[in-house]
Amino acid sequence: MRTTVVAVVMVIFCVMMADADVKPQRDFNLQRFAGKWYRVGLAYDSASFVPFRDKLKASMGIVTALPNGDVNLTMWDATPLGCQVMVYSYEKTNVPGQFTYFSTRHNMVKDITVMDTNYTEYAMVLKHKVFNREYTQVALYGRTQTVRNEIINKFKAFALSQGFSRGSILIPPPAENCSSRSG
């Protein structure tokens, strides 16, 4: 029994320590962050994602800051079946730059943290949740479909620091902007 209690305490401690490393952009400014972004990089190691890696293109999104501090994100993805539009509602937390959202795909609440941004060129965003296994995804967003090599290298270094293998880091090619065709 004592061993079980010690093991549970250690697991909780490790989870708390992992979350302690997740710190958002210092002095995060949602108004400056709002606007058009392209997902130009992705680090994701899910086995279910592997068949889609070669089909992924840079997608476009619009971040809309709501008056209460929440965020709506509308994403457009060009797929072989045409343009897909997804809308996500992110709820603010008491920490600027950190949000939560309900994932209909996984039927649970997940955490979103804007880890690093200069607002005018790039942003690195971490999705994180612990459920049947630890789920982490790092995305690189750019204000344009291409970003400087220094930023790509910074993104890759950050993804590697989060435990991703080089093979799970993807820089998808640019895609046609399908948002103009969808309305």
Image: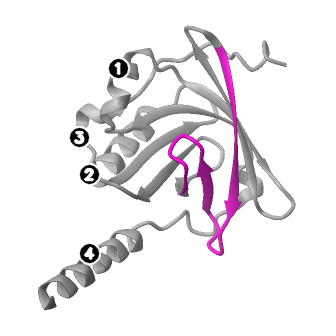
Lower position in the chain sequence, tag 1 or tag 3: 1
Distance from disc 3 to disc 2, alpha carbons, whole Å, reads: 7 Å
Does the image show residue 145? no
Look at the magenta stretch and give its main secondary structure.
strand
In the image, which disc is placed on residue 163? Answer: 2
* Secondary structure beneath label 3: loop
Query: Could you say which quadrant of the image residue 46 lies in?
Result: top left
Give the residue pinned by disc 4.
Answer: 11
For the residue pair 36 and 152, the one nearer the viewer reads as 36
Distance from disc 1 to disc 2, alpha carbons, whole Å, reads: 21 Å
In the image, which disc is placed on residue 165? Answer: 3
Rendered view: 172 above or below 3: above
* Secondary structure beneath label 1: helix
Amino acid bearing label 1: Pro
Say left or right for 96 vs 109: right
Q: Give the range drawn in magenta.
A: 83-109
* Secondary structure beneath label 4: helix
Image marks 3 and 2: residues in contact by CB distance under 8 Å: no
Amino acid bearing label 2: Gly
Mark closer to the observer (1, 3): 1
Does the image show residue 92? yes
Rendered view: 173 above or below 29: above
Q: Is residue 101 magenta?
A: yes
Query: Could you say which quadrant of the image residue 10 lies in?
Result: bottom left
Residue 105 place in picture, x, y as percent:
54, 40
